Image (spheres, rainbow, N blue to C red):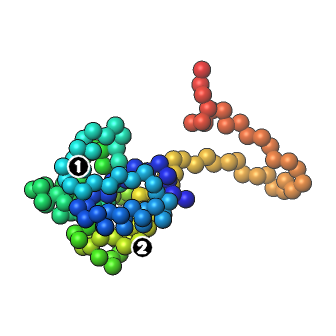
Amino acid sequence: MPNKTLRILIADEHPYQRLQLEKMLNGLGYYRIAPVESFDDLQRLVQCALQPFHLLVGNIELGSHAGVDLARFCRVSTQIQHALLYHSHHLKVPSVPQTERQAVSISLPNAPDSEALESFMAIIDSPQLLGQLLLPAANGSTAGYPRRRLNFAHTVFGRSN
């Protein structure tokens, strides 16, 4: 199930490419999308953002036209959590181990197709496991008896006065 609160930027100077990427993301269930057509617009939007963007999907040449390394811009920007950058059309998103998914940045040789975009979104939008509560083991045979209520008042979910 997609996280519909993800804030996504699409940066490409070609209107058709921006529209295609937005349609693919919409098809995957993502709608909080801001398309930009120049690096200046991208930079302005990122610098003025009150909250970080979860993902930037962008044409790497957009930064080159402004004399900026877009991959480096994404790495140093605290307002961009993940980046999917491409050079200009079928490719495969490489697998990223679960332990390396804090800030995923991938550079592709072409614009992502729907399969590549879906694979990337599965990497960055996977549910994160915050912790597990171990329940006491059941005693021998408890068939037919109601389960005992467990008191979780002192877990991370409880409030202390």
Q: Residue furthest front?
A: 15
Which percent across, then down, holds residue 16? Answer: 31, 67
Q: Residue furthest bottom?
A: 90
Q: Residue furthest top?
A: 161
Which residue is label 1 attached to? 41
Q: Earlier in the sequence, mark 1 or mark 2?
A: 1
Which percent across, then down, holds residue 131? Answer: 54, 47
Q: Is residue 74 above or below residue 90?
A: above
Quick check: can you spot residue 83? no
78 or 130, which lies in front? 78
- The dot on residue 89 is none
Left or right of residue 123: residue 108 = left
Which percent across, then down, holds residue 62? Answer: 19, 60
Left or right of residue 123: residue 60 = left
**Residue at the (43%, 51%) spot, across then down:** 32
Q: SS at mark 2?
A: helix
Q: SS at mark 1?
A: helix
**Residue at the (21%, 55%) spot, across then down:** 38
Quarter of the image for the N terminus: give it.
bottom right
Give the residue type at disc 1: Asp
Q: Which quadrant of the structure image shows residue 66?
A: bottom left
Quarter of the image for the C terminus: give it.
top right
Please identify, in this view, whether the residue under mark 1 or under mark 2 is nearer the observer. Answer: 1
Left or right of residue 33: residue 42 = left
**Residue at the (60%, 28%) spot, across then down:** 159
**Mark 1 burial class by Cα count in 10 Å: few <14, some 14-19, many 20+:** few
**Residue at the (60%, 36%) spot, across then down:** 157
Which residue is label 2 attached to? 115
**Mark 2 burial class by Cα count in 10 Å: few <14, some 14-19, many 20+:** some
* Disc 1 from disc 2: Cα separation: 28 Å
Which percent across, then down, holds residue 57? Answer: 31, 60
